[in-house]
Amino acid sequence: SAEERQERVSRMAKLVSEAMRAIMISTPLVRFHQRIDIVKHKREIREAFEGYQYGACMPGGTENITWLARVCWDHGIPFVQSDVPNGFPGANLKQVYDAVSAIIPSMLPSFLRWCEHGYEVFGQDGYLLDCVVGGMPQGDPLIPIFFGALMVHKMKLTEAFLEGMGGQAGDQQATAKALALFFADDGFMAHPQPQVALAYRKHFQGQLASKDDVYAHSGQTRAECEADLVAAGFDPADVRIVCRDFSSDWSDEEQAQARAGGGASVPVGVKCLGVPVGNAAFVEKFVRRAAQGDKREDEGSANSALDNVENLGCLLADDAQERLLLLRHCIATKLTHLARFSSAELFEQVTARLQDAIEQDIRA
Protein backbone atom coordinates (compact mmCIF):
# COMPACT_ATOMS: atom_id res chain seq x y z
CA SER A 1 0.00 0.00 0.00
CA ALA A 2 1.00 3.65 -0.30
CA GLU A 3 1.22 3.95 3.50
CA GLU A 4 3.58 0.97 3.73
CA ARG A 5 5.76 2.39 0.98
CA GLN A 6 5.95 5.77 2.67
CA GLU A 7 6.88 4.11 5.97
CA ARG A 8 9.61 2.15 4.20
CA VAL A 9 11.04 5.31 2.62
CA SER A 10 10.95 7.14 5.97
CA ARG A 11 12.75 4.24 7.66
CA MET A 12 15.45 4.23 4.97
CA ALA A 13 15.90 8.00 5.29
CA LYS A 14 16.50 7.67 9.03
CA LEU A 15 19.09 4.97 8.48
CA VAL A 16 21.12 6.91 5.92
CA SER A 17 20.63 10.40 7.42
CA GLU A 18 19.51 13.44 5.48
CA ALA A 19 22.48 13.39 3.08
CA MET A 20 21.34 10.32 1.13
CA ARG A 21 23.52 9.58 -1.87
CA ALA A 22 21.56 8.26 -4.81
CA ILE A 23 23.42 5.54 -6.71
CA MET A 24 22.17 4.76 -10.21
CA ILE A 25 22.77 1.44 -11.91
CA SER A 26 22.70 2.48 -15.55
CA THR A 27 21.25 0.25 -18.24
CA PRO A 28 23.83 -1.41 -20.54
CA LEU A 29 22.64 0.80 -23.42
CA VAL A 30 23.13 4.02 -21.43
CA ARG A 31 26.57 2.93 -20.27
CA PHE A 32 27.51 2.03 -23.85
CA HIS A 33 26.49 5.43 -25.19
CA GLN A 34 28.22 7.31 -22.36
CA ARG A 35 31.44 5.37 -22.78
CA ILE A 36 31.46 6.30 -26.48
CA ASP A 37 31.31 9.94 -25.34
CA ILE A 38 34.26 9.40 -22.99
CA VAL A 39 36.39 7.64 -25.63
CA LYS A 40 35.60 10.36 -28.15
CA HIS A 41 36.73 13.15 -25.81
CA LYS A 42 39.42 11.38 -23.75
CA ARG A 43 42.27 13.53 -25.10
CA GLU A 44 40.53 16.79 -24.17
CA ILE A 45 39.60 15.38 -20.76
CA ARG A 46 43.16 14.34 -19.93
CA GLU A 47 44.63 17.63 -21.08
CA ALA A 48 42.14 19.54 -18.94
CA PHE A 49 42.52 17.33 -15.85
CA GLU A 50 46.31 16.88 -15.85
CA GLY A 51 47.80 18.39 -12.70
CA TYR A 52 44.39 19.00 -11.12
CA GLN A 53 41.89 16.14 -11.10
CA TYR A 54 42.78 12.42 -11.11
CA GLY A 55 39.39 10.80 -10.48
CA ALA A 56 38.49 10.10 -14.12
CA CYS A 57 40.33 9.30 -17.37
CA MET A 58 43.71 9.64 -15.64
CA PRO A 59 45.81 6.45 -15.46
CA GLY A 60 47.28 5.73 -12.04
CA GLY A 61 45.08 8.36 -10.41
CA THR A 62 45.24 7.11 -6.84
CA GLU A 63 48.97 6.32 -7.05
CA ASN A 64 49.77 9.86 -8.17
CA ILE A 65 48.27 11.29 -5.00
CA THR A 66 49.03 8.58 -2.42
CA TRP A 67 52.71 8.36 -3.32
CA LEU A 68 52.94 12.12 -3.23
CA ALA A 69 51.45 12.02 0.27
CA ARG A 70 54.03 9.44 1.33
CA VAL A 71 56.87 11.56 -0.06
CA CYS A 72 55.56 14.58 1.85
CA TRP A 73 55.32 12.60 5.09
CA ASP A 74 58.77 11.05 4.73
CA HIS A 75 60.39 14.46 4.05
CA GLY A 76 58.49 16.53 6.60
CA ILE A 77 56.45 18.50 4.06
CA PRO A 78 53.04 19.56 5.43
CA PHE A 79 49.85 18.70 3.61
CA VAL A 80 46.12 19.16 4.05
CA GLN A 81 43.36 16.69 3.21
CA SER A 82 39.78 17.85 2.58
CA ASP A 83 36.56 16.45 1.21
CA VAL A 84 33.63 17.89 -0.75
CA PRO A 85 30.39 17.53 1.27
CA ASN A 86 27.94 15.01 -0.18
CA GLY A 87 29.96 14.47 -3.35
CA PHE A 88 28.22 14.25 -6.71
CA PRO A 89 24.62 14.72 -5.46
CA GLY A 90 25.68 17.92 -3.69
CA ALA A 91 26.99 19.51 -6.88
CA ASN A 92 25.07 22.50 -8.22
CA LEU A 93 24.10 21.80 -11.82
CA LYS A 94 24.42 25.47 -12.82
CA GLN A 95 27.99 25.47 -11.51
CA VAL A 96 28.69 22.18 -13.30
CA TYR A 97 27.36 23.70 -16.53
CA ASP A 98 29.69 26.69 -16.13
CA ALA A 99 32.61 24.38 -15.36
CA VAL A 100 32.04 22.09 -18.35
CA SER A 101 31.73 25.20 -20.57
CA ALA A 102 35.08 26.51 -19.30
CA ILE A 103 37.11 23.30 -18.89
CA ILE A 104 35.86 20.81 -21.50
CA PRO A 105 33.53 22.83 -23.79
CA SER A 106 33.45 20.06 -26.38
CA MET A 107 31.43 17.96 -23.90
CA LEU A 108 28.76 20.58 -23.24
CA PRO A 109 26.24 18.86 -25.57
CA SER A 110 26.83 15.60 -23.68
CA PHE A 111 26.23 17.33 -20.35
CA LEU A 112 22.95 18.84 -21.55
CA ARG A 113 21.84 15.53 -23.01
CA TRP A 114 22.37 13.52 -19.82
CA CYS A 115 21.93 15.96 -16.95
CA GLU A 116 19.51 18.73 -17.83
CA HIS A 117 16.39 16.95 -16.55
CA GLY A 118 17.79 15.76 -13.23
CA TYR A 119 17.43 12.21 -11.93
CA GLU A 120 14.89 10.12 -10.06
CA VAL A 121 15.55 7.08 -7.86
CA PHE A 122 13.05 4.21 -7.87
CA GLY A 123 12.70 1.17 -5.64
CA GLN A 124 12.37 -2.42 -6.87
CA ASP A 125 8.60 -2.09 -7.07
CA GLY A 126 8.79 1.08 -9.17
CA TYR A 127 8.00 3.41 -6.27
CA LEU A 128 9.76 6.80 -6.34
CA LEU A 129 12.29 6.94 -3.47
CA ASP A 130 14.15 10.17 -4.06
CA CYS A 131 14.87 12.93 -6.59
CA VAL A 132 18.27 14.31 -7.53
CA VAL A 133 17.33 17.48 -9.38
CA GLY A 134 20.04 19.90 -8.33
CA GLY A 135 22.95 17.45 -8.33
CA MET A 136 24.28 14.31 -10.00
CA PRO A 137 23.99 10.67 -8.86
CA GLN A 138 26.82 8.18 -8.69
CA GLY A 139 26.74 5.36 -11.21
CA ASP A 140 26.73 6.88 -14.69
CA PRO A 141 30.15 6.68 -16.44
CA LEU A 142 30.01 10.37 -17.42
CA ILE A 143 29.30 11.75 -13.94
CA PRO A 144 32.96 11.59 -12.73
CA ILE A 145 33.92 13.57 -15.85
CA PHE A 146 31.41 16.34 -15.20
CA PHE A 147 32.22 16.43 -11.48
CA GLY A 148 35.94 16.46 -12.29
CA ALA A 149 35.41 19.48 -14.54
CA LEU A 150 33.64 21.21 -11.66
CA MET A 151 36.59 20.62 -9.33
CA VAL A 152 39.16 21.75 -11.93
CA HIS A 153 37.13 24.93 -12.44
CA LYS A 154 37.03 25.59 -8.68
CA MET A 155 40.77 24.95 -8.41
CA LYS A 156 41.58 27.41 -11.19
CA LEU A 157 39.32 30.01 -9.57
CA THR A 158 41.22 29.42 -6.30
CA GLU A 159 44.58 29.89 -8.00
CA ALA A 160 43.39 33.17 -9.56
CA PHE A 161 42.01 34.37 -6.22
CA LEU A 162 45.27 33.63 -4.38
CA GLU A 163 47.35 35.28 -7.11
CA GLY A 164 45.16 38.36 -6.78
CA MET A 165 45.64 38.40 -3.02
CA GLY A 166 49.40 38.13 -3.39
CA GLY A 167 49.55 40.84 -6.02
CA GLN A 168 47.62 43.29 -3.87
CA ALA A 169 49.73 42.58 -0.80
CA GLY A 170 53.03 42.45 -2.69
CA ASP A 171 53.88 39.36 -0.64
CA GLN A 172 56.05 36.68 -2.26
CA GLN A 173 54.75 33.99 0.09
CA ALA A 174 51.17 34.88 -0.80
CA THR A 175 51.93 34.31 -4.49
CA ALA A 176 53.60 30.92 -3.88
CA LYS A 177 51.52 28.15 -5.41
CA ALA A 178 50.44 25.11 -3.42
CA LEU A 179 50.44 21.71 -5.08
CA ALA A 180 46.74 20.82 -5.04
CA LEU A 181 45.25 17.64 -6.51
CA PHE A 182 41.81 16.09 -6.29
CA PHE A 183 40.63 12.54 -6.76
CA ALA A 184 36.91 13.13 -7.45
CA ASP A 185 35.79 14.81 -4.20
CA ASP A 186 38.92 14.07 -2.13
CA GLY A 187 41.40 16.95 -2.00
CA PHE A 188 45.14 17.02 -1.27
CA MET A 189 47.11 20.28 -0.82
CA ALA A 190 50.82 20.50 -0.03
CA HIS A 191 53.70 22.99 0.10
CA PRO A 192 56.97 23.19 2.06
CA GLN A 193 55.64 26.41 3.63
CA PRO A 194 52.67 25.49 5.86
CA GLN A 195 50.91 28.82 5.32
CA VAL A 196 50.79 28.29 1.54
CA ALA A 197 49.02 24.92 1.79
CA LEU A 198 46.67 26.21 4.51
CA ALA A 199 45.89 29.38 2.54
CA TYR A 200 44.78 27.25 -0.41
CA ARG A 201 42.36 25.36 1.85
CA LYS A 202 41.18 28.56 3.54
CA HIS A 203 40.36 30.33 0.29
CA PHE A 204 39.19 27.38 -1.82
CA GLN A 205 36.49 28.70 -4.14
CA GLY A 206 34.15 25.76 -3.61
CA GLN A 207 32.54 23.89 -0.75
CA LEU A 208 34.70 21.67 1.46
CA ALA A 209 33.56 19.90 4.61
CA SER A 210 35.49 21.39 7.53
CA LYS A 211 34.71 18.34 9.71
CA ASP A 212 36.86 16.21 7.37
CA ASP A 213 39.92 18.52 7.31
CA VAL A 214 43.24 16.92 8.24
CA TYR A 215 46.51 18.81 8.71
CA ALA A 216 49.50 16.46 8.59
CA HIS A 217 53.09 17.50 9.30
CA SER A 218 55.57 14.82 10.32
CA GLY A 219 58.29 17.42 10.93
CA GLN A 220 56.48 19.44 13.60
CA THR A 221 55.02 19.06 17.08
CA ARG A 222 51.37 19.51 18.00
CA ALA A 223 52.03 22.99 19.38
CA GLU A 224 53.74 24.08 16.15
CA CYS A 225 50.89 22.69 14.02
CA GLU A 226 48.29 24.48 16.13
CA ALA A 227 50.26 27.72 15.73
CA ASP A 228 50.22 27.21 11.93
CA LEU A 229 46.45 26.75 11.96
CA VAL A 230 45.84 29.82 14.10
CA ALA A 231 48.07 31.93 11.85
CA ALA A 232 46.08 30.77 8.81
CA GLY A 233 42.75 31.65 10.43
CA PHE A 234 41.64 28.17 11.53
CA ASP A 235 40.47 26.97 14.92
CA PRO A 236 42.77 24.00 15.78
CA ALA A 237 39.83 22.32 17.52
CA ASP A 238 38.05 22.06 14.15
CA VAL A 239 40.91 20.32 12.32
CA ARG A 240 42.30 16.82 12.81
CA ILE A 241 46.05 17.11 13.45
CA VAL A 242 48.55 14.36 12.70
CA CYS A 243 52.16 15.27 13.45
CA ARG A 244 55.43 14.08 14.96
CA ASP A 245 54.18 13.71 18.53
CA PHE A 246 50.38 13.63 18.26
CA SER A 247 47.40 12.31 16.33
CA SER A 248 43.79 13.38 16.78
CA ASP A 249 42.88 9.76 16.06
CA TRP A 250 44.78 8.34 19.04
CA SER A 251 42.86 6.44 21.68
CA ASP A 252 43.26 7.33 25.36
CA GLU A 253 45.63 4.39 25.72
CA GLU A 254 47.81 5.57 22.83
CA GLN A 255 47.91 9.11 24.20
CA ALA A 256 49.06 7.77 27.57
CA GLN A 257 51.73 5.67 25.88
CA ALA A 258 53.02 8.70 23.97
CA ARG A 259 53.13 10.82 27.15
CA ALA A 260 55.13 8.06 28.84
CA GLY A 261 57.84 8.37 26.23
CA GLY A 262 56.82 5.55 23.89
CA GLY A 263 55.81 7.78 21.02
CA ALA A 264 58.01 6.03 18.47
CA SER A 265 56.02 2.80 18.83
CA VAL A 266 52.60 4.48 18.71
CA PRO A 267 50.94 4.43 15.26
CA VAL A 268 50.95 7.93 13.73
CA GLY A 269 49.58 8.61 10.28
CA VAL A 270 46.61 9.26 8.02
CA LYS A 271 44.71 7.36 5.36
CA CYS A 272 45.03 8.94 1.92
CA LEU A 273 42.56 7.43 -0.58
CA GLY A 274 42.54 4.23 1.44
CA VAL A 275 46.34 3.99 1.66
CA PRO A 276 48.18 4.31 5.01
CA VAL A 277 50.64 7.22 5.15
CA GLY A 278 52.65 7.43 8.38
CA ASN A 279 55.25 5.73 10.51
CA ALA A 280 56.04 2.01 10.35
CA ALA A 281 53.74 1.17 13.28
CA PHE A 282 50.81 2.89 11.56
CA VAL A 283 51.35 1.08 8.25
CA GLU A 284 51.73 -2.29 9.98
CA LYS A 285 48.56 -1.79 12.05
CA PHE A 286 46.61 -0.84 8.92
CA VAL A 287 47.83 -3.83 6.88
CA ARG A 288 47.22 -6.30 9.71
CA ARG A 289 43.68 -5.04 10.26
CA ALA A 290 42.86 -5.21 6.56
CA ALA A 291 44.21 -8.76 6.22
CA GLN A 292 43.32 -10.23 9.63
CA GLY A 293 40.33 -8.14 10.73
CA ASP A 294 39.54 -6.58 14.08
CA LYS A 295 37.33 -8.59 16.43
CA ARG A 296 36.16 -5.68 18.53
CA GLU A 297 32.64 -5.54 19.87
CA ASP A 298 31.98 -1.93 18.84
CA GLU A 299 30.83 -0.51 15.51
CA GLY A 300 34.42 -0.05 14.33
CA SER A 301 35.06 -3.78 14.06
CA ALA A 302 36.02 -5.19 10.67
CA ASN A 303 35.89 -8.66 9.15
CA SER A 304 39.16 -10.01 7.83
CA ALA A 305 39.81 -11.01 4.26
CA LEU A 306 40.40 -14.51 5.67
CA ASP A 307 36.87 -14.53 7.12
CA ASN A 308 35.50 -13.55 3.72
CA VAL A 309 37.29 -16.46 2.00
CA GLU A 310 36.03 -18.95 4.58
CA ASN A 311 32.50 -17.53 4.29
CA LEU A 312 32.53 -18.15 0.54
CA GLY A 313 32.82 -21.89 1.16
CA CYS A 314 29.80 -21.82 3.48
CA LEU A 315 27.55 -19.51 1.49
CA LEU A 316 28.41 -20.74 -2.01
CA ALA A 317 29.44 -24.32 -1.39
CA ASP A 318 27.78 -25.59 -4.60
CA ASP A 319 28.70 -22.72 -6.91
CA ALA A 320 32.39 -22.92 -7.75
CA GLN A 321 32.12 -20.40 -10.57
CA GLU A 322 30.67 -17.68 -8.33
CA ARG A 323 33.28 -18.38 -5.64
CA LEU A 324 36.11 -18.04 -8.17
CA LEU A 325 34.69 -14.77 -9.53
CA LEU A 326 34.46 -13.29 -6.03
CA LEU A 327 37.97 -14.49 -5.19
CA ARG A 328 39.36 -12.93 -8.35
CA HIS A 329 37.51 -9.62 -8.44
CA CYS A 330 37.02 -8.85 -4.73
CA ILE A 331 39.40 -10.62 -2.38
CA ALA A 332 42.38 -10.88 -4.76
CA THR A 333 41.99 -7.18 -5.56
CA LYS A 334 42.23 -6.32 -1.87
CA LEU A 335 45.36 -8.45 -1.57
CA THR A 336 46.93 -6.59 -4.49
CA HIS A 337 46.01 -3.28 -2.83
CA LEU A 338 47.84 -4.33 0.36
CA ALA A 339 50.90 -5.44 -1.60
CA ARG A 340 51.24 -2.01 -3.22
CA PHE A 341 52.17 -0.16 -0.04
CA SER A 342 53.49 -2.69 2.49
CA SER A 343 56.94 -4.27 2.60
CA ALA A 344 57.36 -7.76 1.15
CA GLU A 345 58.17 -9.16 4.61
CA LEU A 346 55.10 -7.65 6.26
CA PHE A 347 52.83 -8.68 3.39
CA GLU A 348 54.04 -12.29 3.54
CA GLN A 349 53.69 -12.40 7.31
CA VAL A 350 50.13 -11.07 7.60
CA THR A 351 48.66 -12.79 4.51
CA ALA A 352 50.19 -16.29 4.82
CA ARG A 353 47.01 -17.91 6.19
CA LEU A 354 44.88 -15.95 3.76
CA GLN A 355 46.85 -17.11 0.74
CA ASP A 356 46.67 -20.71 1.97
CA ALA A 357 42.88 -20.42 2.32
CA ILE A 358 42.56 -19.01 -1.22
CA GLU A 359 44.70 -21.84 -2.62
CA GLN A 360 42.61 -24.47 -0.80
CA ASP A 361 39.37 -22.93 -2.07
CA ILE A 362 40.67 -22.90 -5.65
CA ARG A 363 41.81 -26.52 -5.41
CA ALA A 364 38.45 -27.51 -3.95
Image (cartoon, rainbow, N blue to C red):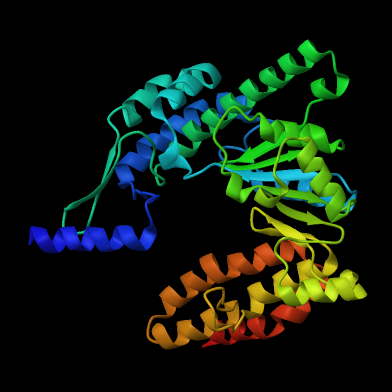
How many numbered circles does the render carry?
0
Q: Residue at x 73, y 17 (%)?
A: 165
Residue 354 in the image, given as x and y percentages of width and height: 64, 82
Q: Residue at x 90, y 51 (%)?
A: 219
Residue 13 placement (x, y as % from top left)? 31, 57
Where is residue 283? Give x, y as percent: 77, 67
Residue at horizontal 56 percent and vertical 28 percent from the top? 45
Tell me if 163 is positioned left or right of 76 in this view: left
Pick the front one: 55 or 312: 55
Q: Quadrant of the N terminus?
A: bottom left
Q: Is residue 341 above or below residue 348?
A: above
In-front residue for pair 77/201:
201
Q: Is residue 228 above or below residue 353?
A: above
Point out residue 149 in the picture as x, y percentages from the top left corner. Answer: 53, 28
Asked if one can make out residue 349 in the rendered structure from this viewpoint, the answer is yes
Is 329 in front, or is 217? 217
Going 70% across and 40% down the picture, which residue do you hit? Answer: 234
* Residue 141 visible in the current orientation: no
Residue in the foreground of this view, choosing between 171 and 277 = 171
